[in-house]
Image: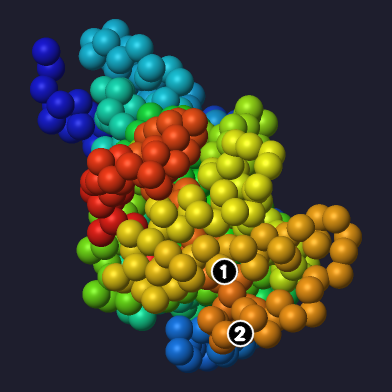
Amino acid sequence: MIEESVILQRISGFLNTLKEFVLNCKNTRAIDCGKYQGNIRLASNVVVEVKATNVSYEEGKLRNLKLEQSVLFGPHWGSVEYIFEDCILNSDEYLTLLNDLENLYQFTEAQKNFPLFVRRVIRTLLEGEQDTDEKLNELSSLCLNSFYGRPFKYGSESFIYGIELELGNIQLEVHQIKVRISKLTNEDFEFKGSVDELIKLEKERNFAPRIPLAKLEVEFDGFSRGDIYPKTQKIITALRLFRVGSVDYNCMREYSNSLTDEEFLSLNEYGYKTATIKYFSNVGNLNRAFDTYQIKEEELPSLEAFLGMIYLEIPHNFYGGDLKKNYLSISYDRYVTALLDGQSLEYRIASAVMGLESIYLTESMELKYRLSVRAARVLSIWSDKNSNFSPGKIKLLISYAYDIRSAFVHGDEPNKDLPKKIKNYVPDINHFLLVILGYLRISIALHLMLKISKKDFVAQIDNSLIDDDCLYLLKEKILAFKEVIPV
């Protein structure tokens, strides 16, 4: 078995030759290579540069943002990239090394991966950044990773709503996935590239009607870019279930450092992220809700523990729209609708109640009573954490919410006395919605962690209402997760 250091030395020797050739051509603007002779004619490039200033936060919210745009003119080295590729991929040095990689070193993937490596090297050299040597060393390591079948880095970057940060950024690790949430900075809004790239980027980001609050980055070592979307969606789902907030992303950019994901290159020749955005939410909807919750420094251990526990329990049908739904995914869908849709408070409350119904009801009779009593039995275990979780208050508030839901669904006018009754227990109707959403959030998270069928769950609740031993067993199961699920 040939040592890896020997192979790396061969690749480094080839890199030095390649680097000398490209940089000499770049500096002299001339080339002497087979059919390519004489001066290099570069296309002129119109470059738009966007600079951001005055990005600042007040009480966790982004308050100021000023963008300044300028137009630059210069040579476009990307227009002659193909010339360097043609010269190098047909050179004796390249063909000899490629033959050795396949036959001497037994790298069967060399024919596919090594040309991609060379293209990355050429692009890096033509960009002409100061850290070129560091990037070339990184590319050499990636090349070896592809030959030895080692994992690459995959990840996503999303601008998100619904979360305010007390700190500038937080970093967590969830089942070998690195999660970073940070306040937005000037760099997040800056760009340098072609006019077409900028137009596409602005269209895809579309921050109307509100600028995002933070940036979510998810990164892991893996073998498939197909894992990026589900892993990111599970983190977003977990953040929605941690506390009540309209957590959603404006746009999601996927990235990878895998050589075989050449189209995944997310940097243009100026080193700026281009429009490689893969997924979009419906945040641009003017009826969107924008409720937020704040992550405080002292909450980070509980957040990491919660994400670690619930991440593995989140089913695919919570975020895969084409999959078969069940009662729990329907409940989660109702929860998300109530979180994000700002059409009317009545609609949001009705959606939240229907989410609770999906978990706590199996019958068609005495729905309001059964729903409020069952939910009160389960959720009152958190009564020492928050005054809204006393059993009597839970039963009463869910009953009120059910009345609003019934009036909305049947097209009736809500009881005019209901708002006054609600204000005896919570400050206003907006706060009332958040309390009901809190009941639903905890119910979904608890049900995921209990790993129990709806039929058995409802039966255990009903039995606990008449049997102290059953009540003890139910409480024992729920108490195992009480400290993990925040109120």
- Describe residue 267's horizontal placement relative to residue 430 as left or right: left
Task: Note whether 57 is above or below 371 in the view shown.
Answer: below
Task: Note whether 10 is above or below 347 in the view shown.
Answer: above
Q: Quadrant of the C terminus?
A: bottom left
Q: Residue at x 45, y 89 (%)?
A: 59
How many numbered marks appear? 2
| Residue 402: x %, y % from top left | 67, 60
Q: Residue at x 79, y 79 (%)?
A: 416
The residue positioned farthest toward the front in the image shown: 466
- Describe residue 93's horizontal placement relative to residue 239 as left or right: left
Amino acid type at image mark 1? Leu
Residue under numbered circle 2: 423
Task: Note whether 275 is above or below 326 in the view shown.
Answer: below
| Residue 129: x %, y % from top left | 40, 62
Q: Quadrant of residue 459?
A: top left
Q: Is residue 403 visible?
A: yes
Q: Quadrant of the N terminus?
A: top left
CA–CA distance between discs 1 and 2?
11 Å
Frontmost residue, 172 versus 474? 474
Frontmost residue, 101 versus 157? 157
Task: Note whether 5 is above or below 477 in the view shown.
Answer: above
Frontmost residue, 248 versus 468? 468
Q: Is residue 181 visible?
A: no
Q: Circle 1 — which element?
A: helix
What mark, if any, has residue 2 been given in the picture?
Answer: none
Mark 1: give few (<14), some (14-19) or many (20+) Cα within 10 Å: many
Residue under numbered circle 1: 397
| Residue 100: x %, y % from top left | 28, 15
